[in-house]
Amino acid sequence: VSKTVELTVDGVKIAVPAGTLLVEASKKAGIEIPVFCHHEKLKPVGACRMCLVEIEKMPRLQTACTTPVAAGMVVKTTTPAVKEAREGVIEMLLANHPLDCPVCDKGGECPLQDNTFGYGSGVSRLDEPKRSNKKALPLSERIVLDRERCILCYRCTRFHDEIAGDGALVPLERGGESEIGTLTGETYDSPFSGNTVEICPVGALTSRSYRFRSRPWDLQHSDSVCSGCSVGCNVRVDARDGSVLRVTSRTNDAIDDGWLCDAGRYGTLPPPLGAEHAPEGKDAPRRARFPALRIDGKLQRVPLERAIARALELLGSPRAAIAFAARLTNEAMPLASELRAALPGCALGFFEPVLSPWPVVGRIQNLTSVKRIVDLGCDPWNELPILALRLRKATAAGAPLVVVGPRNGLFRDTRHWLRGTADAMAGACEDLARALAGETCSNEAAVAAASLRGDGPAAVLLGAHFARDARTLRAATRIAELLHANGDTGFCGAPMRGSNARGAAELAPALAAVDPLAQRPDVVFSFGLDAPVLPPGGRAIVASSGTIVDDPAIEVLFPLAHAYETDGHVTNLEGTVQSLRAIARRPGDRHGELAMDHELLGALLRAAAARAPALARGRA
Amino acid sequence: MTATQSHAGAPAREYALSAQCKEAILAERAAYPQPRTALLQALKIAQAEVGFLPPSIVAAVADLIGVSHAQAQELTTFYSMLHTERHGERVVQVCTQVPCGFMGGDRLLGQLARGLGVAPGETTADGKVTLERTVECMGACHRAPMCRIGDGYVENLRTQADVDALVAALRKGTVPATPGTRNHDCHPQQQAPHEPPRKTAAAYEPVLLTHQPRTTPVTLAEYRAAGGYEALQKALTTMQPGEVTDVVKQSNLRGRGGAAFSAGMKWGFVPKGPGPKYLVVNADESEPGTFKDRELMEVESHLLLEGMAIASYAIGCNEAFLYLRGEYVEAGARMRAAIAEAKAAGLLGKSVLGSKFDLEIHVFLGAGAYICGEETALLESLEGRRPMPRSRPPFPAVAGLYGRPTVVNNVETIVNVPHIVKRGADWFKALGPNPKSAGPKIFCLAGAVNRPGNYELPLGSVTFRELIEQCGGGVAGGRTIKGVLPAGISAPIVPADKLDTKLDYESVAAAGSMLGSASLIVIPDDVDIVRAAVRMLEFFRHESCGKCTPCREGTAWLHKILLRLEAGRGEAKDLELLLSLSSRISGKVLCALGDFATSPVTATLQHFKNEYLAAIENGRGARDDWSRRP
């Protein structure tokens, strides 16, 4: 139970929970205290000194970003001393800053620009030469560093120290020579590197995929959900002229905690529609923009109705199948189910398994505060990355982590690793279960089990791949029972990876149980998959938002709206339903050319219904 | 450019650690409560074997300790004693900071450069010797001019003959790189001429530096024969830990590191609950003009150990750390030897003196970073992280080393503890005229005096002038005094007209400065104050950790302006800018280093503005002597 503390900021009385930092408390009074190093998801550091304020009874100015509120505190943020201090910090920060705003990606959304306009003196007294450095130093294939622009707020390095825990980026050298970097000759390698670009308060760290592509004021925004995996991180999609250029975090404390993984941030963007902003060459594979049929050996543009008619005709084959992507919206799921009735001979199902043998119980946010963790062959670091950050927070707070499985995906935080191999997974899990129950077990398991003793909520994660084995699943659920890993405060289950796998399992259960490719179909309709299925010797129908490599097997092609171009809803691994808002359509892209999942399915259903009698006749 | 990078067609060479070296690193890793503490020592072990730290070696060390490669490189590039490039077999580092610089350091650098035929920063053609000018003070100000060679010191290099002998020894390769002070290996004089006399002028019998002018360590037998470890026995057998804290509190012992905070109160802040607590003794003595802890550790090792044991008992600590600056290799070796002696005699380790009290003491050497003298930066360094000061609260007494309650005390603070326990708080308070600011104090006296050295006297018992005249034997060369820096270069200069100020915290504060660590640097009239300010700001610029904006950017900016002034390219408006920038640093920074960094500018400008105006008018030119233009 947190106490409330009353204080006064610039004459405004406010009440905030005890322990709140002054900089956050002041927001409640509608007072902005400028910051650079402060970030609400990182620990207080007090490095940039931009947030100096006057507090009554304190002899020196204090940093609002490190000072917790106290009862009766009287804070002043507009005195001459504060104004002078802010001008001083801005002056010092600009002393070695190149002021190359006209060619800087950050221009227009730059805290240094904003604070300089808001709190700087507007005059330079600098007569000395500035420190100069190589511009645009590539740190990795994704990220470029401009050391001249860096103001050493240490947000990026603190992110890797406190949040990712991988120490991938560090401050080097010291004093005025300090700079951000890695070990000489090594690349900046982290599955979470893009977050540092987002939290950088200047244009020092930039994404190579976004550099020089747009100005912030030319971007259209929409709120969506990352389609990379089933965590469902909240994103803001930024597009220019209808082409998605980047996604940034739209902080949802209950799900993503404000962070995105690189796989989501960089790996989920739809290919650009036109060549205007595309870095690829003219002949590079393109994204489908119009419905097309193979006529005279070439894919040629046709009206949607004709493409649908041809698709339905092909799907009349006795060995036809439709493989849906697990990312389809909840709006599309019932329509996909209905299509099953309209195409009686066709095998309809999801390309990847969506039905978890052990559906997740518990909230993602519980993972942060669990006291004991068992990971059975689940690889959150690579497959559900944001969960790994949550688990790291728990281990950093002292929660023991026992990993069973061939990989130790959470390597640095693991307390005990029982190396169950891919073959011997069930045995290793049973061993740990017996150890927890106090039965005969291996020494290794006994030691690991001992570390898990104690009270408090627990998390048990099972890799979806291993969950299909009945013995492993039984052992896993037994471990969860023994650790009392319940859903109220804990977390257990085998999360599936598809971004709407849970929605699929709940809203299209009949399809969820089917492997559409099990019977070696000769006609496959790939619906929404990243890479289409091309049956050997057979024919393919493709509905895709990705780039299309022209293959003679493709008979029919439907352009599909990407997740970020779609309105609808998806259900994440914990069962939370979240909405996707499409970015404004590209000018000239008339409705129907880039169909959303449910639009195309609706059109297919209507056409199939009209055709049904004919189909029936054909069968007879 | 390192070998593994192989830019510009240089042949790539992979370096690897020997099995023996890896073993030493793993042993170091196992020695501390957390493996990352061993990272700095591991890098030093690797460097000792390979000669420098190329990326492949940094990566190998990181893997052995269990941190990311970048995190190991973070330390490698921060500490000035770790090198990413290969040096000559012997690195000769000449101190040119205040006071060494004006006591002949710059001259020595020039003599060595001519003698070796290289410019500072270069290595001789045969790869044997690298000559360097250091910005950091080495803690040998009373034996200026001096240089550090390998892990040893060569001091009192006063004449051309001394330098010639040294150059010859370097050419022959007979100067060892091992720790120790070896004036005589390459020094024609048999005895350093000016070690301080044992007795100071006042009628006072020293209790801390009881063996002057001796420079060899006091053995355990000698120490015990003189009543050593009786105070520890008394504390363990007759006093509760709280009682020890109480008597230290009553004595008003104030921290000798510079901040002068009550040691007993600091101990009292440590919460009582279960779990480990730590004592960390700050021996990172890096303030220019300060060399007292060095003498205490090199000679009075057991007095320090006894003090550490009593303090640990008082606060409930079973694992204590002694953090020495990296250059104090000799002091570190002597402390380790003393610990081994004490352990063998049952005075440390399991059940100290047969009691239920256990104590392990780690001797931990830094690697060249003034900021580690700041207690929270020191803790970061101990944790194997970049030594940048922490923002307070929480204070170390609540959350210090590894987030646990920690007391950080200076060496000189701790050596007072056995005496207080043995003789009582009243004895301590009676030493000196002011009971609130009493007790023995070691005054480091350096600069232009005839007998520089450490002098132990009660606080407040003498004035600046009395100390200089009676202990220091007056100003060298019959010159007059321009001013005295009372706390190394970190406190405002006290001009000549205030030399009758008593040497205690309150009186020096009233005179507009700070007593701090009581490291008095006497600056004679003929030293150019602009040159002195340039060197002092060069120091703060070099030693700023880079964490907070005003210190990182401000010290560099101030230094650049001063360099321009010194070169004769200054303007009158620069003086205004110097003061304005100083006010935008001081009071706005995260730790005291930034506050200290401005007084070399503001105080010298306040008292000696005419010299700044003269520099603007005429410039100093790039002369390597420090004297003013006639």
Image: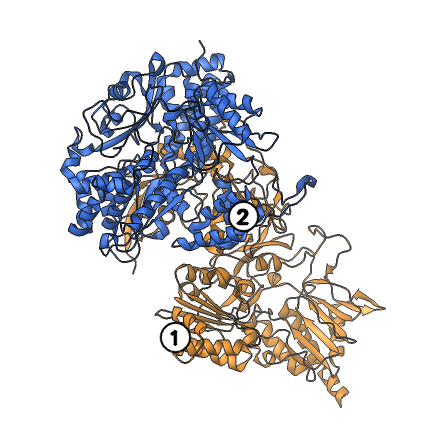
Chain colours: A orange, B blue
Q: Hey, what amino acid is under mark 1? A: His
- The image's mark for residue A484 is 1
Task: Quadrant for residue B408, please give it.
Answer: top left
Q: Is residue A100 above or below residue B109?
A: below
Q: Nearer the viewer, mark 1 or mark 2?
A: 2
Q: Which residue, as the protein is rendered here, is positioned at the far top?
A: B630
Inspect this view and state whether residue A197 appears: no
Instruction: Depth check: give the residue in front, A521 or A9.
Output: A521
Task: Quadrant for residue A314, please give it.
Answer: bottom right
Q: Which quadrant holds the N terminus of chain B? A: top right
Question: Percent from the top left, x then y, of residue B536?
Answer: 42, 26
Q: Is residue A464 above or below residue B86?
A: below
SS under mark 1: loop
Q: Which residue is mark 2?
A: B58
Give how far apart the Cα atoms at labels 1 and 2 are.
44 Å
Dot 2 surroundings within 10 Å: few (below 14), some, or many (20 or more)? Answer: many
Instruction: Depth check: give the residue in front, B32 or B602.
Output: B32
Q: Is residue A198 above or below residue B181?
A: below
